[in-house]
Image (tube, helix red, strand yellow):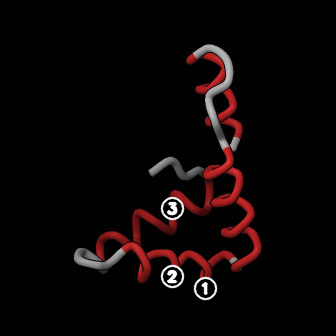
Amino acid sequence: MHLEGNAAKWYQAYKQTHTKISWVTFCLAVEQQFGADDYRNALTELIDLKQSGTVEDYTTKFEQL
């Protein structure tokens, strides 16, 4: 997981109380906590990310998501 700020703090607390969950359950929890639109936009950006240049360029784009 690559989370920052409030999302990272939320995830640290979440994983302590939710040890065995499915990906779908986790996604629903993220949507509930942070809103569906932000989640969908971020997921869409991640899915659309394709390597078209160097690995360094790809890594930089990934880190900016």
Please name which of the two marks, 2 or 3, marks the residue nearer to the observer.
2
Mark 2 and mark 3: span between their CA atoms? 14 Å
In the picture, measured across the screen, residue 18 lies left or right of residue 30, that is left
Q: Residue at horizontal 52%, vertical 57%?
A: 8
The answer to whether the residue labelled 2 contacts the one labelled 1, judged by CB atoms less than 8 Å apart, is: yes
* Amino acid on which the number 2 mark rests in the picture: Ala
Q: Residue at horizontal 66%, vertical 69%?
A: 39
Front one among 21 and 13: 21
| Residue count near mark 3 (Cα–Cα under 10 Å), binned few <14, some 14–19, many ≥20 | few
Front one among 21 and 45: 45
Q: Earlier in the sequence, mark 2 or mark 3?
A: 3
Q: Which residue is mark 2?
A: 29
Q: Earlier in the sequence, mark 1 or mark 3?
A: 3
Q: How many marks?
A: 3
Q: Which residue is mark 3?
A: 9
Q: Say if 39 sits above or below 63 in the image.
A: below
Q: Position of residue 64 (x, y in %)?
A: 70, 37
* Amino acid on which the number 3 mark rests in the picture: Lys
* Amino acid on which the number 1 mark rests in the picture: Gln
Q: Which residue is mark 1?
A: 32
Mark 1 and mark 3: span between their CA atoms? 15 Å
Front one among 23 and 9: 23
Q: Position of residue 10 (x, y in %)?
A: 51, 68
Q: Which image quadrant is residue 23 in?
A: bottom left
Q: Position of residue 7 (x, y in %)?
A: 58, 62
SS of the residue under disc 3: helix
| Residue count near mark 2 (Cα–Cα under 10 Å), binned few <14, some 14–19, many ≥20 | some
Please name which of the two marks, 1 or 3, marks the residue nearer to the observer.
1
